[in-house]
Image (cartoon, rainbow, N blue to C red):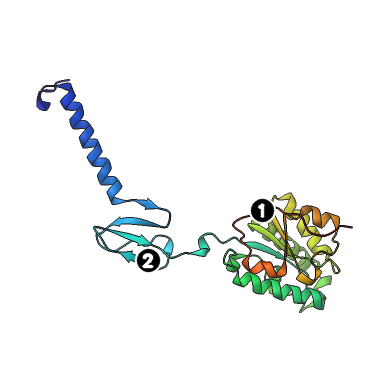
Amino acid sequence: MRFQNYNNTKEDYLETVRKSFQNTLDESLARIRRRKDGIYYENKGKLPDPHNKPKPTVVPGDFVYVQYPPNTNNVAKTVYFAAGWFTDKQNKAYKLAMDAIEKNPTIDRENSYVPLEHQYKGLRVDEHPELLGDKEWATATFNGDCLGIKSSDIFLCTYIPDEEDIGYGVELGLAKSLGKYIVVVIPDEDYGKPINLMSWGVADKSIKMSELENFDFNKPEFNFYEGAVY
């Protein structure tokens, strides 16, 4: 290789290459600097809006720093909501849990699976009890619920110790076999009462109803239920 264009020395040539590489690297880093809570963009033309995020707060400068406000949809989890709705007590717990789910920012309520909202052909068994004798409706609804468990991030179950429902017992078992994170929610007034051994065994986390609204589903953890089994 000839080096006469670089003062005829190999050292000068290598230094020139090093500087050229460093300049290119510096320019690239200056154009796009990624940060945890935002992205720097070169101040040219319309600012990009990736992933349809909310309108950013812009901090002006040589480069514009696009700082997006928190978007909980990016971190929220979908849940399969298992619950009985056949007694007054079950219905009360159902409504309390649904209200808490709506308010919990770590739950993607819109895309979560609530069985009553996904019954075959939109026919709810609580409104059409005659469907309990319809094999097509029963089979399709069962398969739909199994699909809901498989496709959801987390399995959430409202559990009443005095009024256990065999249906969510089956759902708990399926969720466990699929490796889902299982959260069992028990009404405050019932928390601590003895529960079924198998239901106790599959639960990863047991919480009181009053804790559901603020429970962080992005930070799964294990605990023991504070009560006996039978």
Q: Quadrant of the N terminus?
A: top left
Report how far apart the C-alphas of labels 2 and 1 lie in the structure: 33 Å
Image quadrant where residue 23 sits? top left
Q: Which mark is residue 56?
A: 2
- Which residue is located at x 76 percent, y 54 percent? 224
Mark 2 or 1 closer to N-term?
2
Q: Residue furthest right?
A: 230
Q: Which mark is residue 119?
A: none
Q: Secondary structure at mark 2?
A: loop
Q: Which mark is residue 221?
A: 1
- 10 Å crowding of disc 2: few (<14), some (14-19), many (20+): some
Between label 2 and label 1, give the one nearer the viewer.
1
Q: Is residue 47 above or below residue 125?
A: above
Image-based side of 210 in relation to 37, left or right: right
Q: Nearer the viewer, residue 210 or 123?
A: 210
Residue 165 drawn at (x, y percent)? 83, 66
Q: Nearer the viewer, residue 177 or 209?
A: 209
Q: Residue furthest top?
A: 1
Are the residues tagged 2 and 1 within 8 Å (C-beta)?
no
Residue 155 drawn at (x, y percent)? 69, 59
Q: Quadrant of the C terminus?
A: bottom right
